[in-house]
Image (cartoon, helix red, strand yellow):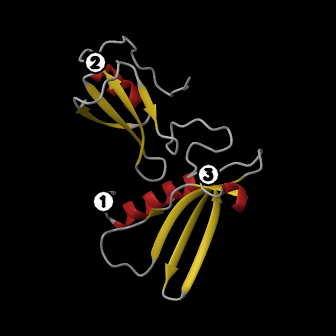
Amino acid sequence: MINLPFAIHNCGKPATFRIEVYSHVVAESLDGVVYVCPAHPNTAGDAITAAGFTTATAPVTRDVERRCGFVHVFATGALATDDRHPRWCGRDGCDRRGEHRSRVSDVDTNRPEASIITVALVQTTHPAAGPMVVLSATGGMAYDRVVMSIGQARVLRYRLGGLIDAAGHDRA
């Protein structure tokens, strides 16, 4: 049994819609697919989005037979339950490195910049360890990496917002 962060109706009628479940922990990730009958796409979609996920709904293809309430969870997605890894972990080489790592997100403005910046989550494999934010910058021949707590990252987010507002630029 899967312990999902949202409740889905399980009436058992033939499913006619599939709802793809995406998380945005670090980068957009397809985490699972929920199958529903004609009576439940709206309530299921509302429950999924209320839990912090986004959805994409499509009709079930003719060759797929699922019942309303069936959920397929992808093993590498944020819905997967694995006590050895945090939900955001990429689940690749953690034991070898001694740390969990999320997918890296590029800070990309779609125009040339002086440096390349990426951000990710890391956490040592020690059971008492908490997640940290890693900010990496590469420019020319230089490379720098800053590791900060979640609290520091939260404050940095607000400080950057204030600086952007002071500069007179939109947040978009």
Between 56 and 156, the one nearer to me in the picture: 56
Number of residue marks: 3
Amino acid type at circle 3 is: Ile
Q: Is residue 169 above or below residue 121?
A: below
Amino acid type at circle 2 is: Cys
| Residue depth check, mark 2 versus mark 3: number of the one nearer the observer | 2
> What distance separates the C-alpha of mark 3 from that of mark 1?
25 Å
Q: Is residue 95 above or below residue 81?
A: below
Q: Is residue 170 left or right of residue 132?
A: left
Q: How far from the left and from the top, in percent, is residue 160?
A: 47, 61
Mark 1 burial class by Cα count in 10 Å: few <14, some 14-19, many 20+ = few
Residue hosting label 1: 170
Residue 150: mark = 3
Between 159 and 134, the one nearer to me in the picture: 134
| Residue depth check, mark 3 versus mark 1: number of the one nearer the observer | 3
User: Which residue appears at 69% of the width and 48% of the height?
Assistant: 130
Query: Which image quadrant is residue 2 in?
Result: top right
Mark 2 burial class by Cα count in 10 Å: few <14, some 14-19, many 20+ = many
What SS does tag 3 mark? helix
> What distance separates the C-alpha of mark 2 from that of mark 1?
42 Å
Mark positioned earlier in the residue sequence (2 or 3): 2
Query: Which image quadrant is residue 47 in?
Result: top left
Mark positioned earlier in the residue sequence (3 or 1): 3
Mark positioned earlier in the residue sequence (2 or 1): 2
Q: Quadrant of the N terminus?
A: top right
Q: Is residue 47 left or right of residue 145?
A: left
Q: Is residue 111 above or below residue 80?
A: below
Task: Confirm or deny contact between disc 3 and disc 1 (CB under 8 A).
Answer: no
Residue 41: mark = none
Residue hosting label 2: 37
User: Which residue appears at 29% of the width and 16% of the height?
Assistant: 14
Amino acid type at circle 1 is: Asp
